[in-house]
Image (cartoon, rainbow, N blue to C red):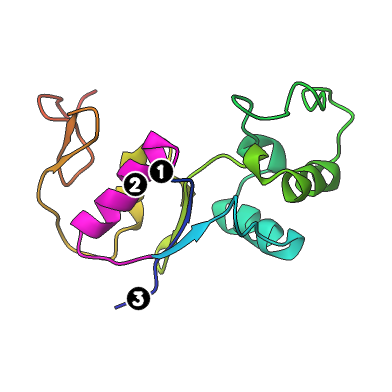
């Protein structure tokens, strides 16, 4: 079985749902609680590259020092923002999942379905009771939506 890694915050419902969804699919990921074990600058740069994202796209505003640091100002360079995330890991949005199929910021949690190296999963119930099907559709939702 290929390696699966999740950068996880156990206080985040989306992160908890994503971890449960991975386990529901029969995978036991390496769980990195990134607030306890922050990624190095090199690791963060690598994650951004694998996700094809900019540092600004990965920034989280809610519950972080984003406003206090005035990170909304346009003068911050990519490297500046990476340095801020290394200094304050809470600024990283989560969860980030890596599998042999790629890397994604899994917001909403069903984005992880794009990365599952398994053929099919059974329906899954999120913490809020919402049901997901194997194709990421919510129960009752049609493919046109």
Q: Position of residue 48 (x, y in %)?
A: 63, 53
Circles 2 and 1 in contact, beta carbons < 8 Å: yes
Which residue appears farthest toward the bottom when viewing the image? 1
Q: At numbered mark 1, what does the secondary structure look like: helix, strand or loop?
A: helix
Q: Quarter holding the N terminus?
A: bottom left
Q: Give the Cα separation between the discs numbered 2 and 3.
A: 18 Å
Which residue lies at the image location 90% right of the left edge and 29% below the top edge?
A: 75
Q: Position of residue 55 (x, y in %)?
A: 70, 43
Camera-nearest residue between 1 and 32: 32
Which residue lies at the image location 84% right of the left edge and 25% below the top edge?
A: 74
| Residue 15 numbered mark, or none | 1
- Give the side of residue 7 with respect to residue 48, left or right: left
Secondary structure mostly taken by the magenta-highlighted segment of the chain: helix
The quarter of the displayed image where residue 42 is located = bottom right
Which span is picked out in magenta?
A: 11-29
Q: Give the Cα separation between the discs numbered 1 and 3.
A: 21 Å
Would you say residue 94 sits in the magenta stretch?
no
- Give the side of residue 98 with respect to residue 65, left or right: left
Report which residue position mark 2 lands on. 18
Q: How many marks?
A: 3
Would you say residue 22 sits in the magenta stretch?
yes
Is 14 rendered above or below residue 82? above
Report which residue position mark 3 lands on. 2
Packing grade of label 2 (10 A; few <14, some 14-19, many >=20) is: many
């Amino acid at each position: 079985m290929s390696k699966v890694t999740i950068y996880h915050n156990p206080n985040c419902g989306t992160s908890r749902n994503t971890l449960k969804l991975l386990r529901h699919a029969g995978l036991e990921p390496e769980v990195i609680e990134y607030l306890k074990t922050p990624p190095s600058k090199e690791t963060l740069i690598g994650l951004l590259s694998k996700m094809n994202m900019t540092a600004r796209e990965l920034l989280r505003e809610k519950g972080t020092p984003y406003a206090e640091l005035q990170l909304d100002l346009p003068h911050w360079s990519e490297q500046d923002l990476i340095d801020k995330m290394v200094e304050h890991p809470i600024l990283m949005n989560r969860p980030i999942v890596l599998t042999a199929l790629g890397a994604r910021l899994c917001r909403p949690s069903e984005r992880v379905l794009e990365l599952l190296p398994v053929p099919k999963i059974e329906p899954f119930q999120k913490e809020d009771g919402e049901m997901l099907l194997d194709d990421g559709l919510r129960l009752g939702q049609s493919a046109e939506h």
